[in-house]
Amino acid sequence: MANAKLRVFLVEFLNYLEPRRYEEQDGIIQDQFQEVYEVLFVTSGNVLVGYRLFNDIFYTKSMSNQAIVGDFACLYNKVSEFLYKPQDILEGYSIKKENF
């Protein structure tokens, strides 16, 4: 019974996923202090995580593939606390906030 419910949930969840592809020259995926409209599930590529301080941008960490961007902000209806930028070619799937 539990497996059947899980299977139905996963099929419904997968129907809402949309493919995404970002490249380094595309700029910022998610800006700091901006509302988050979708959750990004990274399947390949790296994401730089940074912050803006006194009009300068500092990138502090690189998240590798299998990362999730924007989940906390979507779950708790918050703005993004960090900047997210592709380090190279980034591929993944996203789901809109209203469907998450």
Image: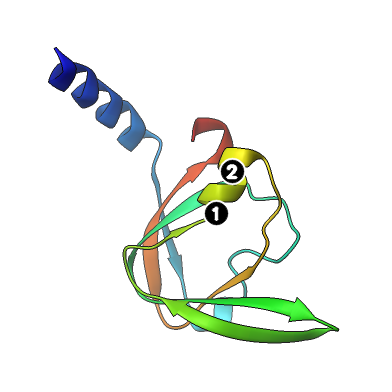
Label 1 environment density (alpha carbons within 10 Å; few <14, some 14–19, many ≥20): many
**Residue 37 spot, x, y in % from top left:** 62, 46
Side of 55 relative to 22 (left or right): right
The residue at 71%/84% (across/down) is 57
- Residue 5 higher or lower than 70, as above or below: above
Label 1 amino acid?
Answer: Gly
Side of 33 relative to 62 (left or right): right
The residue at 27%/31% (across/down) is 10
**Residue 4 spot, x, y in % from top left:** 16, 17
Side of 53 relative to 36 (left or right): right
**Residue 52: which numbered mark, if any?**
none
Side of 97 relative to 44 (left or right): right
Label 2 environment density (alpha carbons within 10 Å; few <14, some 14–19, many ≥20): many
**Residue 43 spot, x, y in % from top left:** 31, 63
In the orientation shown, which residue stands out farthest toward the top? 1
Q: The N terminus lies in which quarter of the figure? A: top left
- Residue 2 higher or lower than 59, as above or below: above
Q: Nearer the viewer, residue 87 or 59?
A: 59
Q: Nearer the viewer, residue 20 or 73?
A: 73
Secondary structure of the residue carrying tag 1 is loop
The residue at 66%/86% (across/down) is 58
Q: How many marks?
A: 2
Label 2 amino acid?
Answer: Cys
The residue at 74%/57% (across/down) is 34
Tell me if label 2 and label 1 are in contact, CB under 8 Å.
Answer: yes
Q: CA distance from mark 2 to mark 1?
A: 6 Å
Secondary structure of the residue carrying tag 2 is helix
Residue named by callout 2: 74
Residue named by callout 1: 70
Which colour style is shown? rainbow
